[in-house]
Image (spheres, rainbow, N blue to C red):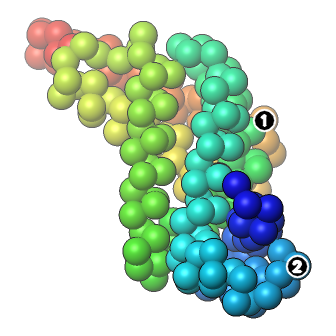
Amino acid sequence: MDANRKRILESALALFLERPFEDVTLQAIAEASGVSHQTVLNHFESKDGVAAGSAEILAHRTAAARSKAVPNNIRSIIDTLVDDYEQIGDANARWAASSERLGSLAALLDVARTNHQAWLDEMFSDHLPKSAKSRSRTVNALHAATDVYVWKLLRRDLRLGRSETQEVIETLVNGVIASSRRVPSGKRSG
C-alpha cells in the first residue's frame, strides 16, 4: 500500500474512532495525515471513500482481536468481545446510531453485523441447535445479547465496571443458550 494512502487511512481511522462521523472532515483527515486535502481526494475521491477504507482496516483488526477467543468457551468469548468493545465500542455505537445519515456507508454496518453473526455462529457452534431455523433464532438472540448497544448501555449509560458488564453479558448469553436447549411441546427443535 502506498505510504500516503496508508497514513491517510490510519489517521482517518483514529479520527473516526474518537469523533462522530459527521464531525470528521476531509480537511481534518488531511491535517492529521500530514498531506493536502487534494491528496486525500486523489486517493479516495470522498469522505465516504476514506471511511470505507478505514472500516476495512477496522474489520481486519476486529477479526484479529476476536480470533483470540476460545471457541465454545463462553467466558473467553465474552472476555474477548468486551476487550474489543473497550477499544472500539464507543465508535461502533456512534456509527450505528448515525446509520440513517451515513448514506452508502450504512452498508458497512450491515457487513459488520453479518461478520458479528458469523463469528457468533463459529464461537458458539457446540452450543447451537442443529436445525437451521432454531440455529438462526439462537444466533439472533446471541447477537442481541452481545450487541455493542448492550455494552454501551452497561458501561456508559449505567456506568458499570468492566467486570460487572462482562458478568451481565455472560448471564444474557447463558440464558440464550439455556433457552435454545429447552424442548418445546415435547419435541426437540434442533
At 42% from the left and 33% from the top, the residue drawn is 118
Residue at 35%, 17% in the rendered image: 128
Q: Which is closer to the viewer, label 1 or label 2?
A: 2
Left or right of 46? Residue 88 is right
Label of residue 34 in the image: 2
Identify the disc placed on residue 163.
1
Q: Crowding at label 2, few (<14), some or many (≥20) Cα neighbours within 10 Å? A: some
**What residue is drawn where x is 28% and y is 25%?**
135
Residue 72, horizontal then vertical, whole percent: 53, 14
> Which quadrant is the C terminus positioned in?
top left
Q: Position of residue 84 (x, y in %)?
A: 70, 42
Q: Is residue 29 visible?
A: yes
Q: Position of residue 1 (x, y in %)?
A: 70, 55
In the image, residue 34 above or below residue 108: below
Q: Are marks 1 and 2 in contact (CB under 8 Å)?
A: no
Figure check: 26 above or below 86: below
Q: Nearer the viewer, residue 14 or 190?
A: 14
Instruction: Describe the element under mark 2 as helix, strand or loop.
Output: loop
Towards the viewer: 113 or 34: 34
Q: Please state which amino acid type lies under the numbered disc 2.
A: Gly
The kind of residue tagged 1 is: Ser
State the residue in front, 14 or 178: 14
